[in-house]
Amino acid sequence: MSEPLSPGDIRWFVPRHGGRPVEVKILSVFEELEIPCAEVFETVDSKYRTLALADLSDTAKEARLKRKGLVK
């Protein structure tokens, strides 16, 4: 990701079960933890999740490539 995350930012990730990239809204960021993570809200399915910051991407395309292991 190109810039630090803050509440209200929109990012993308691909769920572990695969499928399409999902748009999420950042609710809070926990960079001080052993594995930095963020609490997010899925804008389409209305689900709350906690995701590692490394799993978040700026665009859907980047999220897809990251899931395939083509982008770090």
Image (tube, grey):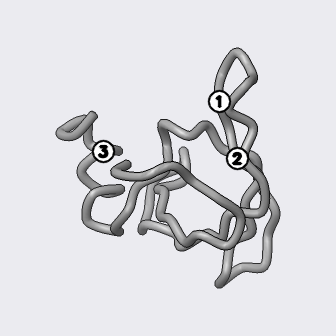
- Looking at the image, do the residues carrying marks 1 and 2 touch, with CB atoms under 8 Å apart? yes
Q: Nearer the viewer, residue 11 or 8?
A: 8
Write the residue at 41% across / 55% down.
Answer: 57
Query: Mark 1: which amino acid?
Result: Pro
Dot label at residue 38: 2
| x, y percent for residue 40 | 72, 60
Q: Nearer the viewer, residue 11 or 65?
A: 11
Residue furthest to the top in view is: 34
Residue furthest to the bottom in view is: 44
Mark closer to the chain start, 1 or 3? 1
Mark closer to the chain start, 2 or 3? 2
Vertical side of 3 occupied by 25: above or below: below
| x, y percent for residue 70 | 17, 39
Write the residue at 51% across / 49% down.
Answer: 4
Dot label at residue 66: 3
Write the residue at 28% across / 34% down.
Answer: 72
Distance of label 2 from label 3 (alpha carbons): 18 Å
Vertical side of 31 occupied by 51: above or below: below
Q: Residues within 10 Å of mark 3 (few under 14, many from 20)?
A: some
Q: Which residue is mark 1?
A: 36
Query: Mark 2: which amino acid?
Result: Ala
| x, y percent for residue 51 | 66, 44
- Looking at the image, do the residues carrying marks 2 and 3 touch, with CB atoms under 8 Å apart? no
Q: Secondary structure at mark 1?
A: loop
Vertical side of 17 occupied by 27: above or below: below
Distance of label 1 from label 2 (alpha carbons): 7 Å
Distance of label 1 from label 3 (alpha carbons): 17 Å
